[in-house]
Amino acid sequence: MAKVTQLVAQLAGPIAAAQGCTLWDVEYVREAGTWFLRVYIDKPGGVCIDDCEAVSRPLSDKLDEADPIEGSYTLEVSSAGADRPLKKAEHFAQFMGSEVEVRLYRAMEGAKECVGLLSGYADGDVTVDTPEGPKTFAKKDVAQVRLYVRF
């Protein structure tokens, strides 16, 4: 049987596309004793609350119809965000050359974080260009990669 997130992505993708958006990611997580089904969407120019509502309403109906989740949960549809995590190969391809923050499970060269320009992605390994030169991090060492937002 497919994972909940995969089933929801199959339902949410066409609904998001019909609203001029793309499906970025789906999470099904438990926080403080409550299950949350989070659907992240994106579109050129950014996502507004009306986009979230336009996806949320028909998706909620589809989820009620398909009933892929036992028990209660809270559905949230939101923007992927300016500092969105990059998880899939297509995410990395889309943002090649962008500034990212790589967070590591354990410190390497005295740091658990590295900020640089995304210059490579292969089989989960991430390469960023830093002022000190390019750095490649093995998939097993990378906890998370996010777009880096400077204020």
Image (spheres, rainbow, N blue to C red):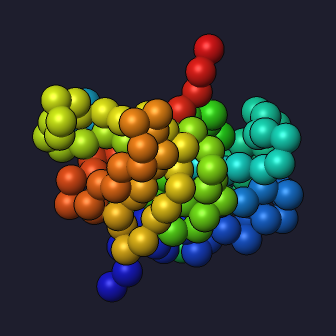
Instruction: Report the side of 140 relative to 65 (left or right).
Output: left
Residue found at the far top of this picture = 151
Instruction: Report the side of 29 relative to 86 (left or right).
Output: left
Instruction: Give the x, y percent position of residue 99.
Output: 57, 39
Residue 8 visible in the picture = no
Please give the name of the residue rendered at 54% of the width and 43% of the height, measured from the top-left corner. 117
Q: Which of 4 and 61 is in front in this view?
A: 4
In the picture, the quarter occupied by the C terminus is: top right
Residue found at the far front of this picture = 132
Please give the name of the residue rendered at 53% of the width and 56% of the height, measured from the top-left corner. 119
Instruction: Report the side of 138 relative to 40 (left or right).
Output: left
Instruction: Give the x, y percent position of residue 95.
Output: 63, 53
Report the number of numbered marks: 0
Q: Which of 55 and 142 is in front in this view?
A: 142
In the picture, the quarter occupied by the N terminus is: bottom left
Residue found at the far bottom of this picture = 1
Instruction: Give the x, y percent position of residue 86.
Output: 49, 52
Please give the name of the residue rendered at 30% of the width and 54% of the height, measured from the top-left corner. 137
Q: Is residue 18 above or below residue 115?
A: below
Residue 151 visible in the picture = yes
Please give the name of the residue rendered at 73% of the width and 71% of the height, measured from the top-left corner. 14
Q: Nearer the viewer, residue 64 or 49?
A: 49
Instruction: Give the x, y percent position of residue 13.
Output: 67, 68
Residue 12 picture quarter:
bottom right
